[in-house]
Amino acid sequence: MEDVAIIGVGLHPFGRFGAKPALEMGAEAVRAACADAGAEWKDVQFAFGGSFEVDNPDAVTGQLGLTGIPFMDVYNGCATAATALELTADAIRAGKYDIGVAVGMDKHDPGAFTSDPVDYGAPAWYGEMGYFLTTKFFGMKINRYMHDHGISHETLARVAAKAFRNGALNPNAFRRKPVAEADILASRMLNYPLTQYMFCAPDEGAAAAVLCRADIASRFTSSPVYLRATTLRTRRYGAHEVHSTWAAVEQDDAPTVYASRAAYEQAGIGPEDVDVVQLQDTDAGAEVIHMAENGFCADGEQERLIAEGATEIGGSLPVNTDGGLIANGEPVGASGLRQVHELVLQLRGRAGERQVPGTPRVGYAQLYGAPGTAGVSILST
Amino acid sequence: MTQVAFAPDVFTWPSDEPQLIGGRCPRCAAVAFPLAPACPRCGTPEMDRHLLPRRGTLWTWTTQEFLPKEPYAGGETFETFRPYGVGLVQLGDEVRVEARLTESDPKVLEFGMELELVVVPFRTDEDGTEIVTYAFQPV
């Protein structure tokens, strides 16, 4: 099986951009990724494009050049970009192509996501009665977790405050103003214990990566980053996940736990080897839980680690160095490739004001979303 | 006043002792809610109708403090909306179900508290018909 290198990354800023179509943002992200790779669009042999709102991400070829390449569109909830990345990598691993692009783009209306619950495997009444809300699930999950593992409301506020501080250092972020912990705690309660400033918001943006066979990466770049693992997992019987009307009494671990274990095995490393981390922080509580689900600490240790600043850019376990979803928002199709963009910058030592000190060698990214789907990617120099 | 059950295939009503209507797998005995066409554990493409225990304990909970977007059909406006509690309620040792709670005060809600199924008003239509739904109430 061929090893895979990421030779270029590109990003259209995340935020609100008026009438600008998502496809135009996607085209800009791909152009930026190709320029970063020292490649041209005509060199690209295939692509996977991810989006929730755009029916045909492949229409981006109309702005990049109609070269006739195979371009496959994917949607996989909040794990859409991890799916595009995994499929692009797999096609190269299998030896079918030498160089390809993974791109994600989206443009959401403001406010919580909504859809038809029937399309998510839940009955129509689940939405009509007011249960079909991802925010409600995250409130229930972190509330129990805090009860079981001694996590405080202050810890949730610290996580959100860190996101806004890191976002202030990131010119591509949606939220770029630091917010005090007291203001986060005092903002409007949306789903107890989660307040408004502890949640990310759906927004707009695009991100892309150019991948190639590792043995030809040096043709394009002197600083390739290698993709050591990509994994996707869905929920198992016994896991209580987003948009479930019920859960089994006999509990099983969340899909992130399985995706994470498989990714470490694939990469041949453990969590202690990771230098910089991107986690799905749909809300501040999700970042706390995902630290443990991805093996970075034991349940409950987050209380001390976060108070000590371990997850800050200069800490021992930097998490969401670009501000994560809380500061960047979540254009669903692009979110996971935004994580990869940040990890590549960090591993190249080119993350500017938010650069993790030392020489980070291993980066880790995790996505989680409806209806209980997780994706993990591990990158290294 | 006419009362109509919202999603009548989900709970037994009218009844003095309403119950949620779940499903039990004829092959592996897994219990799920609501009654669905296939077993979520073993994939058997049939489930037997199975009435769930009326009482349970609060496994976890949150509050819904903003008016949900469509397809929410509670009929409130931003002005009239009142927060409601939502819980994952463990019914015996059979299953946990998501449900509204009649209580929404975080100071009152407790992990493990005893709850009982009740039928409560959900919305009143223009013709005066009261739409009712199920919720769990502290015992």
Image (spheres, coloured by chain):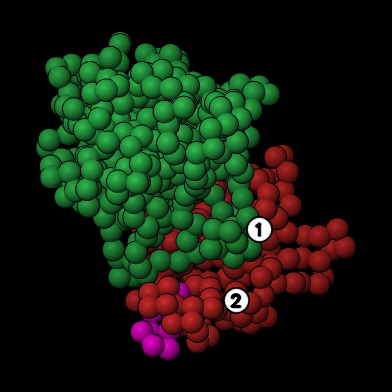
Chain colours: A green, B red
Image mark 2: chain = B
Query: Could you say which is closer to the camera, residue A377 or residue A274?
Result: A377
Q: Does the magenta portion include B29?
A: yes
The residue that label 1 is drawn on is A128
Q: CA distance from mark 2 to mark 1?
A: 16 Å
Which quarter of the picture shows residue A306? Answer: top left
Please count the marks in the image.
2
Give the left or right position of residue A139, taking residue A53 as reference: left
Mark 2 or 1: in front is 1
Q: Nearer the viewer, residue A111 or A8?
A: A8
* Residue drawn at 57 percent across, 31 percent down: A66
Residue A65: where, in percent of width, then height? 56, 27
Q: Position of residue B87 (x, y in %)?
A: 46, 58
Point out the stretch of residues depicted in magenta: B25-32
Q: Residue at point 50% right, 57% down?
A: A243
Q: Quadrant of the C terminus of chain A?
A: top left
- Judging by the rendered image, the residue that carries numbered circle 2 is B11
Camera-side residue of A155 and A271: A271
* Residue A121 in magenta stretch: no
Residue A157 in sight here: no
| Image coords of residue A183 (percent x, y) | 44, 23
Mark 2 lies on a secondary structure that is loop
Q: Going 45% across and 44% down the picture, which residue do you hit? A: A80
Q: Main secondary structure of the magenta part?
A: loop
Q: Considering only vertical position in the picture, is A87 above or below A347?
A: below
In the figure, B30 relative to A144: above or below? below
Chain letter of disc 1 in the image:
A
Residue lying furthest top in this view? Answer: A353
Any mark on residue B42, and which? none
Judge whether A118 appears above or below B13 on screen. Answer: above
Q: Residue furthest right?
A: B127
